[in-house]
């Protein structure tokens, strides 16, 4: 899993592996939002928990690795990439288009739920990164802004330097909160740029030097499954303590937070498993085609105009049985994923045509020329 296996190769199979993981991770994100923004996850402080509730929480634990897995992919690919202002501008505009278009549509049609349509709502639509409309994209953009500094440092460090740097980061932002039975004031629960810098560095280390434990095939899957089961056990263990003593309520869900050691290790295992996977033929072509559009799935269903609405459209409020939960989750993933990918394909098509039209305007041509020139400045480092 080190540089020899995946680091220097740029073949279709390796990229297909990562694109498949990208698709799977986005499906997991849909599952998390389907369960978490509906009534399917029972309150852990309640004394009663039926089989549907237990199954929902177990599914939550197996999908909680999604965001970390996404960042492993980014760190693995970007650690050898140059900072590109054109990429940053394109990403910002993609987020802005979704934020404004879907948010306004939701407000005008009246489908917005649990969100007040006020000045703050419209400011969030207009300034999606600064207002954290999509918290993950806010963290990602801030991390990408650090790439000129972080990327160069990671490429120049030797093994021991990276071990110390990664160890210090993980100790500070991951291990400490995982072992101390209290809520740290500086703990952002993995919802910020600093945590994704930790994952980025870990992914860069895996690419450059590999992890001996994960070199053997099957160990990645084992780490993923074991990590997720421990997340479930840890969460319900803390719940049992709370129900018996009334204490530890503030950290009852700590094992489900992205910067806890268990979701981090489970995500590392899942990433390692996909790095070892052989993807070819029609599946390779399909995931390489679909993968670049998966961000549209997130930008569509997590928009404020739809964020708390689509779950009930897909019947989340009608589920009362275990089989209903399974079928509901499958339906939600299929519908949201397909709609999101198709929406982003349409956006990309419109943007290509718009780019052609705007190319006739001198100011726009100069702007694109400056971006290409700026890309060259960083490519030369």
Image (spheres, rainbow, N blue to C red):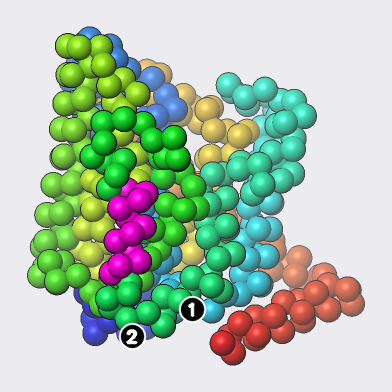
Q: Residue at x 65, y 58 (%)?
A: 92
Q: Characterize the local packing of mark 1: few (<14), some (14-19) or many (20 or more) Cα atoms within 10 angstroms.
A: some
CA separation, marks 2 and 1?
17 Å
Q: Can you name the residue that lies furthest to the bottom here?
A: 380
Q: Residue at x 69, y 51 (%)?
A: 97
> Under tag 1, what secondary structure?
helix
Give the vertical position of 1 relative to 373 (above or below).
above
Q: Characterize the local packing of mark 2: few (<14), some (14-19) or many (20 or more) Cα atoms within 10 angstroms.
A: few
Q: Earlier in the sequence, mark 2 or mark 1?
A: 2
Can you say which quadrant of the picture contains the C terminus? bottom right
Q: Which mark is residue 152?
A: 1
* x and y percentages locating residue 299 in the rendered image: 56, 47
Q: Nearer the viewer, residue 302 or 3?
A: 3
Which range of residues does the magenta coloring cover?
A: 163-174
* x and y percentages locating residue 173 in the rendered image: 37, 49
Is 45 in the magenta? no
């Amino acid at each position: 899993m080190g540089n020899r296996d995946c680091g220097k190769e740029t073949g279709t199979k390796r990229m297909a592996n990562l694109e498949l993981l990208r698709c799977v991770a986005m499906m997991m994100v849909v599952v998390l939002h389907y369960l978490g923004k509906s009534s399917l996850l029972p309150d852990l402080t309640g004394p009663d928990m039926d089989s549907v509730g237990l199954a929902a929480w177990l599914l939550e634990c197996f999908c909680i690795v999604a965001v970390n897995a996404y960042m492993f992919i980014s760190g693995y690919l970007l650690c050898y990439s140059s900072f590109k202002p054109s990429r940053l501008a394109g990403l910002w505009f993609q987020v802005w288009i979704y934020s404004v278009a879907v948010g306004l549509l939701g407000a005008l049609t009246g489908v917005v739920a649990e969100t007040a349509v006020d000045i703050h709502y419209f400011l969030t639509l207009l300034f999606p990164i600064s207002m954290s409309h999509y918290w993950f994209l806010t963290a990602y953009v801030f991390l990408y802004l650090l790439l000129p500094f972080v990327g160069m440092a990671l490429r120049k460090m030797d093994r021991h330097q990276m071990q110390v740097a990664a160890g210090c980061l993980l100790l500070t932002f991951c291990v400490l909160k995982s072992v101390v039975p209290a809520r740290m004031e500086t703990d952002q629960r993995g919802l910020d740029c600093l945590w994704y810098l930790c994952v980025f560095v870990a992914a860069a280390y895996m690419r450059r030097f590999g992890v001996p434990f994960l070199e053997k095939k099957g160990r990645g899957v084992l780490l993923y499954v074991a990590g997720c089961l421990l997340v479930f056990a840890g969460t319900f263990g803390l719940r049992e303590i709370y129900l018996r003593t009334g204490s530890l309520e503030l950290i009852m869900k700590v094992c489900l937070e992205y910067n806890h050691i268990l979701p981090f290790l489970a995500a590392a295992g899942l990433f390692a498993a996909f790095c070892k996977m052989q993807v070819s033929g029609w599946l390779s072509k399909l995931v390489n085609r679909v993968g670049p559009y998966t961000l549209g799935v997130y930008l569509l269903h997590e928009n404020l105009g739809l964020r708390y609405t689509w779950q009930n459209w897909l019947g989340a409020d009608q589920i009362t049985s275990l089989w209903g939960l399974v079928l509901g989750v499958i339906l939600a993933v299929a519908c949201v994923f397909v709609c999101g990918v198709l929406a982003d394909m349409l956006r990309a098509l419109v943007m290509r045509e718009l780019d052609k039209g705007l190319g006739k305007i001198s100011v726009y041509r100069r702007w694109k020329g400056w971006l290409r020139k700026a890309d060259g400045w960083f490519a030369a480092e």
